[in-house]
Image (cartoon, rainbow, N blue to C red):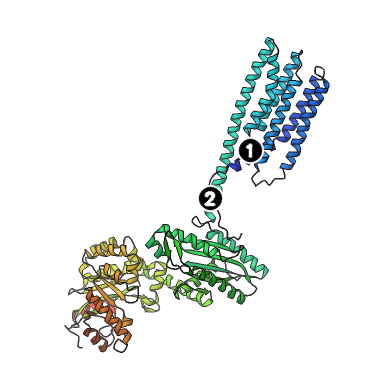
Amino acid sequence: MTQVAFEEPPSTIDLADVKSEQTRILFAAVPSSLFAVLVCSSILAIAQWQVVDQRTILAWFAMTNLLSLLRLLMLRQFEREERDQLIDNIWAQRAVITSLSAGFIWGIGGFLLFPEHSPIHQVFLAFVISGICAGSITTLSAINNAARGFVILASLPIIIKFNLIDSEFSLAMTILSILFVMMVLMSAKRLNQTILESLQFRHQRELAEQTIRYQAQYDELTNLPNRRLFLATLRQEMAKAERHHRYGAVFFIDLDRFKLVNDSLGHSVGDDLLVEASQKIASRVRQEDTVARLGGDEFVVLLPEVGNDLESTGAHASMIADEMRKLFIQPFMIQGHEIHLTISIGVALFPGSVSAEDLLKYADVAMYRAKSEGRDGVRLFSREMQDAVNQLRIIEKGLRQALANSEFELYFQGQYNAENQLIGAETLLRWNHPERGIIAPSEFIDVAEQTGLIVAIGDWVLRSACEQLAALQGGLKLAVNVSPRQFGDAAFVDNLKQVLLETGADPQLLTLEITEGLAMADIRHSIDSMNELKMLGISFSMDDFGTGYSSLSYLHQLPIDELKIDQTFVRNISTSSENEVIVDTIIVMAQQLNLKIVAEGIESLDELQYLKLRQCDYFQGYYFARPVPFDQFAASAAKMPESFSS
């Protein structure tokens, strides 16, 4: 099943469905009803043959069975209707009209075939008509008007006839006939209610089943197919492409920086944006293509037949994806907000010797490549990307083992003041791999962030740093990097308080280094968390300043204590005029905001002297010391001279 159309979920019991079933029940009873009419009319005609005018009997018998023939023809026509479609209301009207007509003809029979001078034949006539009326309850009660009308029209004439005869017998028959009609009408009403309740219950059950099936296969917000239905469709199309030697494509689409919309404008705006984005994506594909939502801000598109070979398919699919990307150039207007949004698209081709799940992963890998290369782009999956994914999996597995086997280690790089005195250190994470030796964080931190392992690793770093801070002498401070995921955790502040309590570390000697991106991601949460921790005495340093948002308005709001100039600006500062301008600007700005300044990555005396002339406060880099394990750092700190020769 392939589709672009947005499916509508089941909502309420459809009364038209119930009415259709009532009509079907009425028509289903026609054969047995006609057989009963034929038998009863024949018996009645024979019984009254000697006491009623025979021409009248024949005329009535002909009318009765001609109507039966008409009902039979109408049944044959009705049976050509589709079973799973709604029945037009005209069929219910026809069923009611023919039922009333039958009642009218039986009523005529009760009037015309009534023998004036034969009580026995009168009773027999009443008995037959009563039987027909009683039988109508089972065949006509699905529609109450049909049953009620038939009984009244069939019974009323014979009741009138009995009432016109002045005798005790006729009075008794009149009363009995009226009581019988009332009883039959009440029974018909109860049976009609039972049928309706049964039909409504069945439709409620069917609705519940449809809802369950819908929820299992469609996304509730956009009404697009979900992952389960998409993968089932993809498997079918991959098998079909294999048989017919045709090539198709899968797009993995992610909305760039969608989280910022949710965080800044609220989830209501975010949901409306997702709906409009899904409609925009669907507007560029064909009817036979499939658009689905996997969850969050991720969408996938299946293009079943794109080309006859891989090269042309890749080119055509990439062109379609780029056209889809360009649709997002125009901003969205959501609840009065103008929102600019871009998308990153990964493309994978089929068929091939992979499963539907792996094909989807390939498209996902290509999409992440598009994101890593600046977003708002299209990338076609390649084997080189898969090699990178395999490497990521190896690193992820290794990180999990490292956590379990205590393979992580903290290194310490000293920080110095303008008099070259050691005032503290920055803690730097290292992975002591059993086979590869010491691995720098640049090789695994991104993987830890992507997989969520950064939270567990960050918790270990904080606890280890606090334990070693408590063991340091001389009032040296420690600076610890905090990851965005870790800092964004609602339990981060409470967890850190517990760590400080358990380790006995002095919070006034602890500095948490955060990045600009971390602080700006949720400015309100950042300010609240930082203020709560500052009440304990903890300081905050903004790490890698100048490489992120660099928003002065946000910087003024954040309760930070120092700025850390990124080493990319410090390097070659004495020979690069551009770096000089950037560093000078950061220092002047920090001084105006009464913030301390830390310069990292100092590797030469020239760089150090330049920064000292600009009144930088603290210094860190290979010029002073390389990162070393805690025991080495503590030992060297204990015998460190008061100043460093410059």
From where the camera sits, is residue 350 visible?
Answer: yes
Image position, residue 583 (x, y; %) = 28, 81
Q: Earlier in the sequence, mark 2 or mark 1?
A: 1
Image position, residue 60 (x, y; %) = 78, 26
Quadrant assignment, res 623: bottom left
- The numbered disc on residue 212 is 2
For residue 260, side relative to residue 414 (left or right): right
Residue beneath the point at 66% across and 16% down: 174
For residue 566, side relative to residue 370 (left or right): left
Q: For numbered disc 2, what is the local secondary structure?
A: helix
Q: In which quarter of the image is the N terminus?
A: bottom right
Question: Label 2 amino acid?
Answer: Ile
Query: Circle 1 is placed at which residue position?
Result: 22
Q: For numbered disc 1, what is the local secondary structure?
A: helix
Question: Label 1 amino acid?
Answer: Gln
Q: Compared with residue 418, is residue 126 higher up or lower down, i.e. above or below? A: above
Residue beneath the point at 71% across and 35% down: 30
Q: Compared with residue 77, is residue 463 higher up or lower down, i.e. above or below? A: below
- The numbered disc on residue 51 is none
Quadrant assignment, res 566: bottom left
Of marks 2 and 1, the one in the foreground = 1
Q: Compared with residue 479, is residue 264 higher up or lower down, i.e. above or below? A: above
Number of marks: 2
From where the camera sits, is residue 399 visible?
Answer: no
The crowd level at tag 2 (other Cα within 10 Å; few <14, some 14-19, many 20+) is few
Q: Compared with residue 619, is residue 69 higher up or lower down, i.e. above or below? A: above
